[in-house]
Image (tube, rainbow, N blue to C red):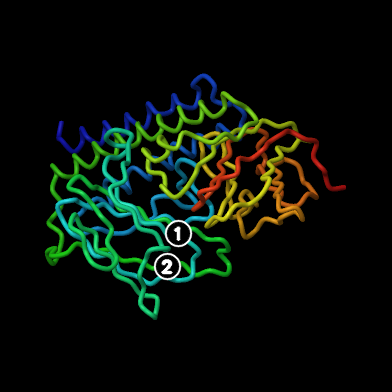
Amino acid sequence: MSVSKAKWETFCDTLKAAGSLLTEPGVPQDEQTQAEGLRYLSRIARAALEWYVEFNDPEFPELYKPSHETIKIGADNPDNIYEKAVIDGRFDYILTGHRGTVDYISMATSKGSYAENFKQIETGFLDSNALITADDGSFQIVLSRHEHEGNWLPIDEDSESLLIRQTFLDRTAESPAVFDVRRRDSGATPAPLNLARTTANFDKAIAFYQNTLGLFARWSQQIIENPNTLPLWDQSFCQSVGGDPNILYYHGHFRLEADQAFRIRLDRIPECQTWNLQVDNYWMESLDYRYHRISINKHTAEVDADGSVTLIVTPAASDAVNTLSTAGHTEGTLCFRWVGTDDPVHPHVEIVPVMTRD
């Protein structure tokens, strides 16, 4: 059998074996969760091929969107645009662009990956609060092992990726930043594709597929062990799998009857860049925010007269302010974030009857 045929068959066998995830103990067997699970398996397959086969040349890096409306991984933030590029710590890179008006941007380099060791360890970090821009909003950032004047995003010899998060308060009113990345001193054109490199990239795609499915399946199982809670998550774990160091993450679960609501109260809003709450399915995918109100943030929430905020998550139609839809789900997961605060306020949660519309 040819090397290429054998590798393709291994890839297909990996996809086939992943179907067992749908019927593992603890996985909800309702029709909606199972339909989303089937789609989720296909989405992570697309992500694996994009990450490791299509966009995997560190000499000629391209920014692409690793998570978006139809590929969702690990409680993707509906307020974010994610962009990613593969890099190699042996080289220097130039990241140029225009700031736009988006509320917050973070840029991080990391080593490790879900295809290797389930880890994405930060090797450098720069955010929009420290970004130096020209009068017209343009900027240039140097990615290098060696310190540079101006905008410097550190890497080390093992750095493998660049991840950019753009976080909006109001997508309808803010313009996104624009980025372009290139390697310093790269050749004019990429080398021709060869079989050894392509099969190695498929090996990485296969490992990423298996590891990513396994990582978030275990994570979801841990979350649902404590139904109807929203605890502060292990921040060292969140950072080890690629979390933003400027964010505190809470991950929780809801299980509701059709006439119930999951009520979340924040006693006050501390000084912060922003905060948000989102509703996710069992697979830790944000629900379809194109058609449902499933997230809320510092800008879109109504604040009570005493400075507190009350948020409602319910499968029912509700008259309450700050209500988020479960898009047909009676069970799922939640993610809450504080961004850029040294004074986090932990949410209080309870199950209450829903105020339904007539």
The N terminus, quarter of image? top left
- Do the residues bearing badges 2 and 1 touch, measured as CB atoms within 8 Å? yes
The kind of residue tagged 2 is: Ala
**Residue ID for mark 1:** 166
The percent position of residue 161, horizontal first and vertical second, equals: 28, 50
Reply above or below: 34 against 88.
above
Q: Nearer the viewer, residue 127 or 93?
A: 127
The percent position of residue 122, horizontal first and vertical second, equals: 31, 45
Check disc 1: other Cα within 10 Å, few if <14, some if 14-19, many if 20+.
some
Residue positioned 55% across, 41% down in the render = 335
Look at the numbered disc 1 and give the secondary structure of its residue. Answer: strand
Which tag, 2 or 1, sits closer to the chain's start? 1
Residue positioned 73% across, 33% down in the render = 351
The percent position of residue 209, horizontal first and vertical second, equals: 35, 36
Reply above or below: 230 against 176.
above
Quarter of the rendering containing residue 225: top right
Look at the numbered disc 2 and give the secondary structure of its residue. Answer: loop
Q: Nearer the viewer, residue 93 or 135?
A: 135
Residue 352 relative to residue 156: left or right: right
The percent position of residue 303, horizontal first and vertical second, equals: 71, 55
Count of numbered circles in the view: 2
Residue positioned 23% across, 47% down in the render = 159
**Residue ID for mark 2:** 177
Residue positioned 18% across, 51% down in the render = 89
